[in-house]
Image: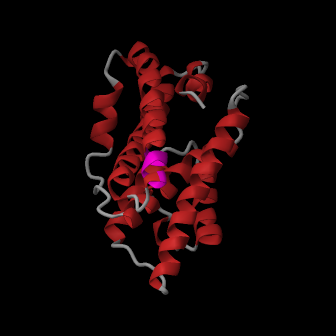
Amino acid sequence: MTGRDFFMPLSAASDTRLTAAQMLRRSACQLAALRAASAGMVFGPTLDDRAAMLDRAREELLQIERAEVLYTKLTGEPLLDAAERVIAELPAPQSWLEASLARLLVCLSARIELESPRPAAASDEAALACEVEHVNAAQAALRELREASGSAIELPSVFRDKWLAVALQALPSECARAHYLTTLERDFGLPCSTLRAL
């Protein structure tokens, strides 16, 4: 998936302010994914894990770079500065576990968005396959950590909740956010029912 393809449906929207707001939320989520991938490069337990995170970081940077051009045309402001402000409160992952959970939260958000009804783009199928792969990799890392510890893994709720808020904000509708939370609970065992008001 290229950043240009991912943002193409937004460029055709009639309401420029809505388009810019959607782009900002998406880009903030991508910037959060970049943070998670960067942490993964530091904490990944194997060279393969670290190399995969480097590839993910490159993808996110390219998407943000391409979106910057369209966002600046729409608003006259730099996208990176605005997106940084949105995620300023995000705690940085301090372990492979936190990096894996952060990746799962933000990549699942992208997957849910690509599954949501929207104007068709030629790259949707490839983009969706890419996000499914990222979600599966994050889920596999979390599963390995759980198996190694022999018990359920608990994370500080402030970490989960702040990353979850960014992931939810990137989704285009209340229906997509509800689907996201249900998927987290059903498929990944992450109870988020107390956060449905976000």
Seen at 42% across and 13% down, the residue is 73
- Tell me the magenta residue range: 48-53
Count all numbered tags in the image, as a single digit. 0
Residue 23: x and y, percent?
47, 31
Above or below — where is 50 with respect to 172? below
Kindly indicate the quadrant of the structure image that contains residue 69: top left
Q: Quadrant of the N terminus?
A: top right
Seen at 41% across and 32% down, the residue is 61
Residue 135: x and y, percent?
58, 55
Residue at the limit of the structure toward the bottom, as seen here: 150
Residue 193 is a magenta residue = no
Residue 49 is a magenta residue = yes
Above or below — where is 120 with respect to 177? above
Q: In this rendering, does residue 177 appear at all?
A: no
Residue closest to the eye, 191 or 152: 152
Please say which color scheme the image uses.
Answer: secondary structure
Seen at 53% across and 80% down, the residue is 147
Residue 110: x and y, percent?
57, 45
Kindly indicate the quadrant of the structure image that contains residue 91: bottom left
Q: Quadrant of the C terminus?
A: bottom left
Residue closest to the eye, 163 or 97: 97
Above or below — where is 149 with respect to 193? below
Residue 76: x and y, percent?
34, 15
Q: In this rendering, does residue 145 appear at all?
A: yes
